[in-house]
Amino acid sequence: MADISVEYVGLKLSSPVVAAPAGTTGTVDLAKVAEDSGVGAVVMRTLYPAQTQETSLPHYELIKHNLGTMKSTTLYSTEHAALADPNRYAEELRKCKEHVRIPIIASLGCSDTAAWPEYVKLLAQAGADAVELHVHCPDAGRQVAAGFVEEMAEVLPAIKSSVGIPLIPKMTPQLENPALAAKALETAGADAVVMFNRFTGLEIDIDREEPVGGRGYAWHGGPWSIFYSLRWISAAAPMLNIPIAGCGGVASAEDVVKYILAGATVAQSCTAIMTQGYHVVKSLNQGLIEWMDRKGYERLEDFRGKVIGKV
Ligand SMILES: Cc1cc2nc3c(=O)[nH]c(=O)nc-3n(C[C@H](O)[C@H](O)[C@H](O)COP(=O)(O)O)c2cc1C
């Protein structure tokens, strides 16, 4: 039987399927469910130290588009910081490390550039195996792409001089050239990059003539978004010496295969877990093993990046 274990930023994962950060990953109980489902690692929901309380109620909406008789779906949602207290977050992280064996990756979003080292240190002390650096959506009004690479280039060396755990910037898809941005992040000291977070959007309620789900923009993702991520991962992978976590639209085992063929080391999934439940992970792992067995691949390295030269 094919071996789907993988090494990612020095961590040993039993599967390349990683639970992406969201309300589905914020607590030790959820981390236990994630572990039982067979994910290789969990990325905890993001800590935003600057937000001291819920800024609005979360909102989730599966929007269906009708194209004749065909249907497509997007998950449109906002979810603000429930675990905004850094000490509570660190405590939950400690519990995860105590009760769960798979690697736990913390996620941090600071709106103040100077604040990153202090909070990464707190998360490292609480036992995080790595930290994702999240500058995509601390608040909907922020210009998500403006200065992303510049901020990380300043922040990464500053954090690296104080803590030794792997640092993984999570990239917004809203960049002019994500492959060059990923390379710049590697040069600045990133240990891996996540490609990508979701797109910012606006859905409109035409009866009430106002934004859906509150007063602001929200984020949208789902299976449709995989093609964008695959396109840029296949462009970035040959330029990078660090691993890529593919993210966006992982809903089936075939999607995991595609990410690895495009050059990713792991594949994160959120919308599929959120809408189908954690049991979906079992089918992702099983389907991946079956595909590899059928193809005669023993390990993920046997086919990682195989599509790159053909694009
Ligand atoms: C409700 C919801 C909450 C999310 N919260 C976070 C978060 O706290 N931090 C983060 O980095 N990404 C967050 N994300 C983004 C996901 O981690 C993931 O990058 C994105 O949804 C794309 O993957 P998908 O297509 O599998 O959903 C959230 C996504 C959703 C749907």
Image: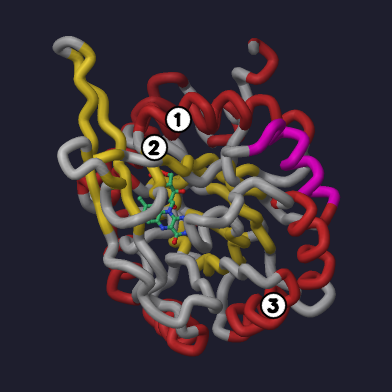
Please tell me how crowded label 1 is: few (under 14), some (14-19), or many (20+) other residues with Cα within 10 Å. Answer: many
Q: Which mark is residue 250?
A: 2
Say which residue appears at 32% left-offset and 39% top-offset.
203
Quadrant assignment, res 109: bottom right
Question: Closer to the camera, 222 or 92?
Answer: 222
Q: Residues at badges 2 and 3 in contact (C-beta under 8 Å)? A: no
Q: Is residue 281 visible?
A: no
Q: Which mark is residue 226?
A: 1
Instruction: Name the residue type under label 3.
Output: Ala
The span from disc 2 to disc 1 (Cα, nearest Å) is 7 Å
Q: Quadrant of the N terminus?
A: top left
Q: Residues at badges 2 and 1 in contact (C-beta under 8 Å)? A: yes
Instruction: Name the residue type under label 1.
Output: Ile
Is residue 179 shown in magenta? Answer: yes
Q: Which residues are magenta?
A: 175-187
Say which residue appears at 54% left-offset and 35% top-offset.
300
Look at the numbered disc 2 and say if its residue's Cβ is closer than 8 Å to ligand 1. yes
Look at the numbered disc 3 and say if its residue's Cβ is closer than 8 Å to ligand 1. no
Residue 64 against residue 275 in the figure, above or below:
above
Q: Earlier in the sequence, mark 2 or mark 3?
A: 3
Please tell me how crowded label 2 is: few (under 14), some (14-19), or many (20+) other residues with Cα within 10 Å. Answer: many
Say which residue appears at 53% left-offset and 66% top-offset.
107
Which label lies toward us, 2 or 3?
A: 3
Question: Disc 3 marks which residue?
Answer: 115
Q: Is residue 5 left or right of residue 30?
A: right
The span from disc 2 to disc 3 (Cα, nearest Å) is 32 Å
